[in-house]
Amino acid sequence: MSAIRVRGFALPHGEPVDLFADGDRWTTDPVPGAEVVAQGWLLPGLVDAHTHPGAEQPGDPLDHDLLREHLHQHVDAGVTAIRSPGLAADPPAWFGTDPDVPRAWHAGPWLAQQDQFFEGWGRRPSHADLPAVAAAQARRTGWAKIIGDWRVGDDVVPLDVLTAVVAAVHEVGGRVAVHSQQADGGAVAVAAGVDSVEHGMCLDPALLNDMAARGTVLTPTLATLRNSLAAVREREDSPRKRWYVEGASAHPGLVAAAAEAGVPILAGTDSVPHGRILDEVRALAAAGLRPHDALAAASWSAREYLGLPGLVPGAPADAVVY
């Protein structure tokens, strides 16, 4: 692409900017011949911080053609960076690097306990091996993803095991993301000092101040959980139905309380269909977050968490213009 120029009012501060790019970095130095491609309200490129592209159904193998298709759906929605806390397999070399797909952070395949999680997905090391396996994954990619709890009544990952995982991953400079949708699993994740709690349904509100103090992130995937609620309400009564209805119904209030307590919130959409990040922004705002903060969770705050600067000289030339 030839040199480009964007100008307008840049969020989060709303000050006027005039940015040029001749390559992959913004500059305020005029670039001869740069074409003005957009002007208006400028946002740092959007982020989907919890997405699992490359497979249509749980347990499906990673399909490289489908992976690129899903990533293009993200780009069409304005997403220029993703975090995939769990993939069906290690991704190809072009993942996160080719110019037509978002920048990407990932945790490789999920790490789960025996007899838990979707058949065909993830690895299931023993409790004794889990810290070393997680650290090896984080050394490669920067992240490890643990399934902290699964079905109603399943055992959660024991606190001593998850604490050892966190220590081992932090030792190699990585971060730990934990899937949690049960109260006990959420309590263990927070006590172990994980870096991010994914979903967080049924999380005890009494833990929010501790999360805020530790800097533990919550990625609530609120829109996905909310959208499934009506169908689950129509099912026959069961412990699983009661768990989901109670947890998903309370989830918006929990997310609002988390934000109020100072817990960092990231916007994520979970799975298919892809390209729905604005649905999550709207869901966060509907739950009670200020619109500015709901948008931050999918833009400048999420980018900062991933180490990506916003609309400043030297930053990656990512922007969405309205």
Image (cartoon, rainbow, N blue to C red):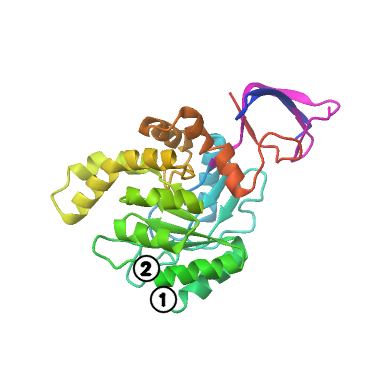
- The disc, 1 or 2, on the residue closer to the chain's N-terminal end is 1
Please tell me whether residue 196 is drawn above or below residue 111 in the rendered image: above
Question: Which residue of the protein is positioned furthest toward the left in this rendering?
Answer: 237
The secondary element bearing badge 1 is classed as loop
Tell me if residue 31 is in the magenta stretch. Answer: yes
Please tell me whether residue 230 is drawn above or below residue 114 in the rendered image: above
- In this view, the residue in front, 178 or 280, is 178
Place of residue 299 in the rendered image (x, y in percent of width and height, measured from the top left): 56, 37
Place of residue 7 in the rendered image (x, y in percent of width and height, measured from the top left): 70, 23
Place of residue 295 in the rendered image (x, y in percent of width and height, measured from the top left): 51, 33
Identify which amino acid the numbered label 1 is placed on. Answer: His
Q: Can you tell which quarter of the image residue 185 is in?
A: bottom left
Query: Which residue does the numbered mark 1 point to in the structure image?
Result: 127
Extent of the magenta region: 19-47
Which quarter shows the N terminus? top right
Which quarter shows the C terminus? top right
* Other residues around mark 2 within 10 Å, as few (<14) / some (14–19) / many (≥20): many
Residue contact at pointers 1 and 2, CB within 8 angstroms: yes
Q: On the picture, is 15 further left or further right than 51?
A: right
Query: Which residue does the numbered mark 2 point to in the structure image?
Result: 157
Q: Visible in this render: residue 141?
A: yes
Q: On the picture, is 223 further left or further right than 265?
A: left
Please tell me whether residue 313 is drawn above or below residue 56 in the rendered image: above
